[in-house]
Image (cartoon, rainbow, N blue to C red):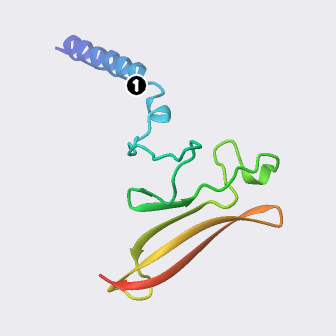
Amino acid sequence: MEREREKEKEKAKEEKEKEKEKNKGSQSTQKHVRELPPISLDSEGKPILPMKLGVMTLKSLGSVVYDNPAFHSARYIWPDGFEISRIYASMKHTDKMTSYLCRIKNIDGAPRVTFFYFISFQI
């Protein structure tokens, strides 16, 4: 009976190792992927803005500042002039919605992310 338990434990351990090997790297390389609708382009091949992306509206892609390391890292890029907005519940008036804007600007050679809110409106 004890020998059977040991065999079952051994088998479970082997299966667990096989599963680990099978999924190796999947957590770091396979993130949740959200599909976007086709992007409309102008005659020069540039995206037509503003563009609706789910609940957000992309207003400006900005430009990549490639010669200043403050504007990029190994993981992120902060393009100068980037703007995106979304409608979200107002922080001041709980019964209203507000349009929020996120903007990245080059201020004194460094990216500055600013948030603005605009007109609140009734739900």
Q: Residue furthest left?
A: 1
Image quadrant occupied by the N terminus? top left
Specify the amino acid type for callout 1.
Answer: Asn
- In the rendered image, residue 101, in percent from the top left (x then y), is placed at 54, 71
Left or right for 20, reference 106: left
- In the rendered image, residue 65, in percent from the top left (x then y), is placed at 75, 51
Where, by quadrant of the figure, is residue 88 drawn? Answer: bottom left
| Relative vertical location of residue 71 with respect to residue 7 in this rendering, above or below | below
| Residue occupied by mark 1 | 23
Left or right for 31, reference 103: left
| Relative vertical location of residue 72 with respect to residue 7 in this rendering, above or below | below
Q: Quick one: 50 or 83, which is closer to the camera?
A: 50
Left or right for 114, reference 67: left
Q: Residue furthest front?
A: 43
Q: Residue at x 52, y 79 (%)?
A: 117
Image quadrant occupied by the C terminus? bottom left
Name the secondary structure under disc 1. Answer: helix
Q: Residue at x 40, y 41 (%)?
A: 32
- In the rendered image, residue 11, in percent from the top left (x then y), is placed at 28, 14
| Relative vertical location of residue 93 with respect to residue 11 in this rendering, above or below | below
- In the rendered image, residue 52, in percent from the top left (x then y), is placed at 42, 58
Numbered disc total? 1
Q: Quick one: 37 or 71, which is closer to the camera?
A: 37
Q: Quick one: 90 or 123, which is closer to the camera?
A: 123
Q: Residue at x 38, y 42 (%)?
A: 35
